[in-house]
Amino acid sequence: MQEIAAAAGVDPATVMALLIKESSLRTMGGGAARTYESGQVVLDKLGVWSALVGHGPSIGLCQMQEKTFKATADKYPGVFEGRSWNEMIYDDELAITAMTYQVKMLQETAEQHQNNSVLTTDQLVAVGYNQGPEKMVGMMSSGKLNEDAQNYVYGQDIRPGYSDFRSITEFAWGGWMNTFDPRWLIV
């Protein structure tokens, strides 16, 4: 995963935190989740899935919709040549690659707009991944976060948010070691 992030020029901690946030169905459902995702794709091809839930299915370890995969593959054709969205159900490396390059696209979009929100660019990229680049840019412009964005970034009730997973990732990779004080362990 770190190699893919390095090739794309994005922070691997951003990708890992998003991956943890987005992959809960897969990690809890295991093989059954792949069957469920395959069923979503079939129902969508029949025109049923979108009619029921209001959007296309999200599949793979990264829970990506087909239109998002297509936009990412169109922007980076050399990376995704000969690959298709539905392969992500069984190809976790493709899913991670697609997520990583989508993060790159979102970062580039965020850098082109003034940020009037309370979120960092990293947090805005997480919102963009969850809600799409248009909503991300709208929140950057207005400075107002919708409830879904707040819940995605900061968590809700007992469900952790992106920022929680980002902190855990940084800690696991040593990012907090510079600020860690062992005296905190003394009770």
Image (cartoon, rainbow, N blue to C red):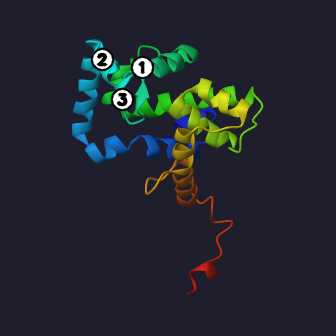
* Amino acid type of the residue that numbered disc 2 sits on in the rendered structure: Asp
Q: Residues within 10 Å of mark 3 (few under 14, many from 20)?
A: many
> In the visual, does 151 lie left or right of 62?
right
Instruction: Give the labeled residue for mark 1.
Output: 66
Instruction: Give the labeled residue for mark 3.
Output: 59
Could you tell me which residue is drawn at 48 percent across and 16 percent down? Answer: 70
The reply to whether callout 1 and callout 3 are in contact (CB within 8 Å) is no
The reply to whether callout 3 and callout 2 are in contact (CB within 8 Å) is no
Q: Earlier in the sequence, mark 1 or mark 2?
A: 2
Could you tell me which residue is drawn at 63 percent across and 39 percent down? Answer: 145
Q: CA distance from mark 1 to mark 3?
A: 8 Å
Q: In the image, residue 178 lies at what x, y percent?
A: 68, 65
Q: Is disc 1 placed on a helix, strand or loop?
A: helix
Q: Looking at the rendered structure, which numbered label has been put on residue 165?
A: none
* Amino acid type of the residue that numbered disc 3 sits on in the rendered structure: Ile
Q: CA distance from mark 1 to mark 2?
A: 11 Å
Q: In the image, residue 56 lies at what x, y percent?
A: 38, 21
The reply to whether callout 1 and callout 2 are in contact (CB within 8 Å) is yes
Could you tell me which residue is drawn at 41 percent across and 17 percent down? Answer: 83
Q: In the image, residue 103 lies at what x, y percent?
A: 58, 32
Q: Is disc 3 placed on a helix, strand or loop?
A: strand
Of marks 1 and 2, the one in the foreground: 2
> In the visual, does 113 lie left or right of 13?
right
Query: Can the viewer see residue 157?
Result: yes
* Amino acid type of the residue that numbered disc 1 sits on in the rendered structure: Glu
Could you tell me which residue is drawn at 73 percent across and 30 percent down? Answer: 141
Q: Earlier in the sequence, mark 1 or mark 3?
A: 3
Q: In the image, residue 6 lies at what x, y percent?
A: 60, 37
Q: Which of the image's four quarters has the C terminus?
A: bottom right
Instruction: Give the labeled residue for mark 2.
Output: 44
